[in-house]
Amino acid sequence: MAEKLTVFNPTGYPPKVVGKRLAPRPQSLDGKTLYLVDCLFDNSEAFMDQLRRWFAEHLPTVNTRMIKPRESWVDDPDMRAKVAADGDAAILGVGL
């Protein structure tokens, strides 16, 4: 006689996602402070450094600052507050 099996779906149920508006886009980055956020993914530091050098060469009037969260995959309210207080824009680098 065949045995009866119970099978569970391992994918679970995705959370409900609520869309948010994008931040307003500045007309220009000239004279502005742009934070380059290294999100601690593999190779993201190297990528953000290359991006910083690109800005220095092609848009030298943009003040770029590199910043990292305290740890990967965890919200860092202090870092976000610093970017919001001192920066005009931010680029998040997630690596390769």
Image: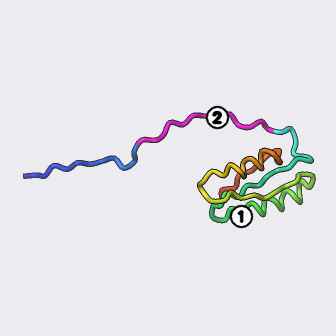
Q: Is residue 23 magenta?
A: yes
Q: Main secondary structure of the magenta part?
A: loop
- The residue under label 1 is which amino acid type? Glu
Q: Is residue 38 left or right of residue 28?
A: left
Q: Can residue 96 be seen by looking at this rendering?
A: no
Is residue 17 magenta-colored?
yes
The correct choice, above or below, for 72 with respect to 20 in the image is below
Residue tagged by mark 1?
A: 45
Q: For the point 92% across and 47% down, which residue is it? A: 31
Residue 21 lies left or right of residue 90; in this view the side is left
- Mark 1 neighbour class, 10 Å CA radius: few under 14, some 14 to 19, many 20 or more: many
Vertical relation: 24 (above or below) 46: above
Q: Say above or below: 25 vs 70.
A: above
Residue 57: percent from left, percent from top: 89, 60
Residue at 89% x, 52% y: name it.
62
The amino acid pointed to by label 2 is Lys
Q: Classify residue 25 by image quadrant.
A: top right
Residue 20 in percent (x, y) is at 64, 34
The answer to whether one can see residue 75 in this image is yes
Q: Which residues are magenta?
A: 13-25
| Residue that badge 2 annotates | 20
Query: Dot 2, crowdedness within 10 Å: few (<14), some or many (≥20)?
Result: few
Name of the residue lying farthest toward the front: 78
Q: How far apart, in angstroms, are the residues tagged by discs 2 and 1? A: 28 Å
